[in-house]
Image (cartoon, helix red, strand yellow):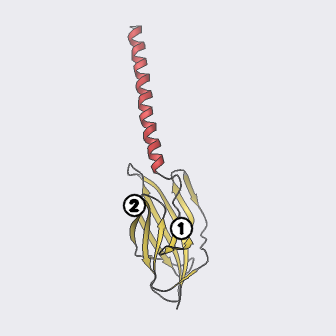
Amino acid sequence: MKKRALLQSASMALALVLLSGVFLAGVQGQAQALASHPPDALLKQGNKILQDGRLISYCWIDGCADGVSRYPSAVLIEPGTRLHIRLSENRRPERFSLTSSRSPDGQSRRIDTTIRRVERDGKTVAWDAYFRLERPDRHYYLGAFGVWKNLSGTVRGDAYWQFHLKTGS
């Protein structure tokens, strides 16, 4: 009986070691595929970077942080210019929204965006959110918000950035 109990214990221990190895390999593989921090967000016109997005708040794999609203200095653009925000994340955001207000503490309205993948060597490396600001001679205080899910489909993280543009007359 002792021999059988010892054999069962050894079998259980071996099974646990094998299962933990499979689990750790899966977690390590997923961790390599997922960034441990929110993506950078860059405001671009074509290939030209106009402004770095100010990361104000986020909840991501490694924790959450909330900051104080701090819009950067305005970048001057022509009305109707095609712009995009590049999100340096290989996974498409589950949700993305862009809002604008006329003042830093004003009421905001949603801006329509079109999301497109950015590929290099056949691999997705980022996502671009395209939009236009049509009205002349106006400040645009922009807030960009994205939500991403992990491989299991649960929310992995969210992030909020701020930008500031001014259209010419």
Q: Could you tell me which secondary element the residue under label 1 belongs to?
A: strand
Furthest residue in direction bottom, as rendered: 169
Residue 131 picture location, percent across and down: 43, 76
Q: Could you tell me which secondary element the residue under label 2 belongs to?
A: loop
Identify which residue is drawn at 42% across, 52% down: 150
Q: Quadrant of the N terminus?
A: top left
| Viewer-nearest residue: 51 or 46 | 46
Identify the residue position indicated by label 2 in the image.
94
Q: Quadrant of residue 96?
A: bottom left
Badge 1 crowding class, 10 Å Cα cut-off, few under 14, some 14 to 19, many 20 or more, is many
Query: Is tag 2's residue or tag 1's residue first in the polypeptide sequence?
Result: 2
Identify the residue position indicated by label 1 in the image.
161
Q: Is residue 152 above or below residue 106?
A: above
Q: Quadrant of residue 162?
A: bottom right
Mark drawn on residue 32 = none
Q: Is residue 95 above or below residue 33?
A: below
| Amino acid tagged 2 | Glu
| Amino acid tagged 1 | Trp
Residue 141 picture location, percent across and down: 54, 77
Q: Is residue 115 left or right of residue 45?
A: left
